[in-house]
Structure formats: structure tokens, C-alpha cells
Image (cartoon, grey):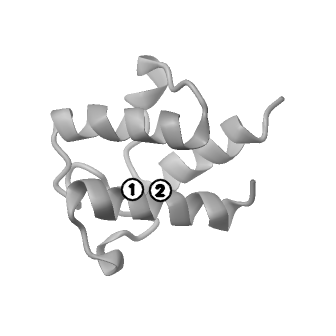
Amino acid sequence: MQREEIAQKVRLILIEKIGLKPTEVTPDANLTRDLGVDSLDYAELVMEFENAFQVRIPDTEAGKLNTFKEVVDYLLASVNTP
């Protein structure tokens, strides 16, 4: 899967689940500080990412994903690893 495909899918999940505008989802947007994602939203988002990309995101790794770019980078590495 290519970076742009992953970024678009993550962007759509954030827009649909959190109710964000497309212009709010920028690479450096911090999920909690800039986009208003609370801990419950975050847990739901991680589950959505896992389902959408057929990957498992351990809690220790999920806690390190603070920005849109970090989520995309993590998923890019995860889906392209055999």
C-alpha cells in the first residue's frame, strides 16, 4: 500500500469518526491537542485503524502515535511488512 492511500484512508476515518473538516487534518496535526481527540475517541480510532488496515497496534505503540503523520508512518510500515 502506498503512503497516499494510507493517508487518505486515515484522513477519512478521522473525518467520519471525529467530525473533522478535511483542512484540519494536516501532517503535523496533533490528535489530542490540535484535533480534540480524547482518550475514548483515541481508543476507538486505534480500533478503526486496526480494522481498516488489518493490523494489530499494541498499546505501547498506540501511545506513541501523536500526530497524523506518525499514524500514517506507523501504518505504512505495518501494512508493508510481511
Foreground pick, 13 / 65: 13
Which numbered dot is residue 13?
A: 1
Q: Which residue is disc 2 drawn over? A: 10
Q: Badge 2: how crowded within 10 Å, few (<14), some, or many (20+)?
A: many
Q: Amino acid at mark 1?
A: Ile
Foreground pick, 30 / 22: 22
Q: Place residue 48 in its image quadrant.
A: top left
Q: Residue at x 40, y 52 (%)?
A: 67
Q: Residue at x 27, y 38 (%)?
A: 42
Mark 2, secondary structure of its residue: helix
**Residues under labels 2 and 1: Cα distance?**
5 Å
Expressed as whole percent of the image width and height from the top left, the position of residue 51 reads 50, 36
Foreground pick, 64 / 15: 15
User: Is 30 rendered above or below residue 40?
Assistant: below
Mark 1, secondary structure of its residue: helix
Expressed as whole percent of the image width and height from the top left, the position of residue 5 reads 64, 63
Expressed as whole percent of the image width and height from the top left, the position of residue 39 reads 18, 34
Q: Badge 1: how crowded within 10 Å, few (<14), some, or many (20+)?
A: some
* Callout 2 touching callout 1 (CB < 8 Å): yes
User: For the C terminus, which image quadrant?
Assistant: top right
User: Is 66 rendered above or below residue 7?
Assistant: above
Q: Is residue 24 left or right of residue 68?
A: left
Q: Residue at x 53, y 66 (%)?
A: 8
